[in-house]
Image (cartoon, rainbow, N blue to C red):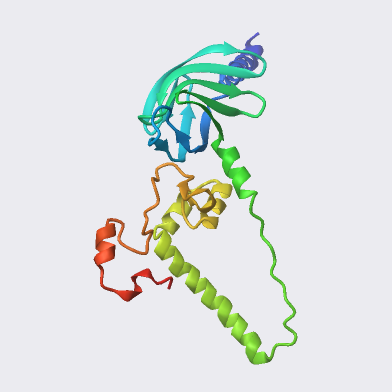
Amino acid sequence: MKHLTLPLILLIQLLILVNGCQDQREYVNLYSGTSPKLEIPDNEESVIEPASLFIRIMDDKLEYLGDTYDYEIVDENNHTITMETSLVINRELEVGSIIYNKQDKTLSLVLSKPEATIKLETYDSMIDRKVQEFIEVDLTADISRLSDNQKEMLKILFEVADIMEEIYWLQVFPDKDAVIESIMDENLKRFFRINYGPWERLNGDLPFMQGYGQKSPGSGFYPEDMTIEEFNSLEDWKKSSLY
């Protein structure tokens, strides 16, 4: 019996571990997406512009913009899990319930004000989907007709292009290296490079990374705290130049 004690203990620990994994709620994750442009009923002048949403579902709470909210599971079947909550996205958007779809692992935020539904997907899935929308291509051309001097000029142009890219990074996102080193996910790192920063250029420059707000209108071309009035009063003919 003494010889069976250690294997028995290990077996019990393994069963506890397996049960613990099974108890892990499948919807616990970070979800993200873009809220659509919405008009508030009975207020023709009130329009809510699209915004990036990052919502983390935990075992007993959900987190949004650093604030935590309670939720309660009110219904579950083979396809969905419905949760009630009182999440406030902003002063105009209130979430009354959240529906988790087990098949595609998405969240549907059912708004109580105004009446609308916003669909979110897991953050990792979103980044993977978005980065797959871009493909790398090899640029090829027949340069056999070029002279030796012209071929040498091409090499120099490629070198200059690399220098120009570094300058552009300084203009749009000076802290590039520090952020890239902190990103562990390769898809996210690639998407960050594609967009030259944490703002998605094909989605209205909305942030696709947590911790970043609206992109500065002047980007890195002008001081972040520069006002429109200061820009307009600046007496420099080059201030509106593309170069």
- The image shows residue 150 at horizontal and vertical percentages of 64, 88
68 over 82 or under it: above or below: below
- The answer to whether residue 187 of the structure is visible from this angle is yes
The total number of labels drawn is: 0
Q: Quadrant of residue 47?
A: top left
- The image shows residue 142 at horizontal and vertical percentages of 75, 79
Q: For the point 47% across and 31% down, which residue is it?
A: 55
Residue 231 horizontal side relative to residue 125, left or right: left
- The image shows residue 134 at horizontal and vertical percentages of 64, 54
Q: For the point 38% across and 45% down, which residue is it?
A: 213
121 over 206 or under it: above or below: above
111 over 186 or under it: above or below: above
- The image shows residue 152 at horizontal and vertical percentages of 62, 86
Residue 76 horizontal side relative to residue 235, left or right: right
Q: Residue furthest top?
A: 1
Q: For the point 53% across and 74% down, which residue is it?
A: 161
- The answer to whether residue 26 of the structure is visible from this angle is no
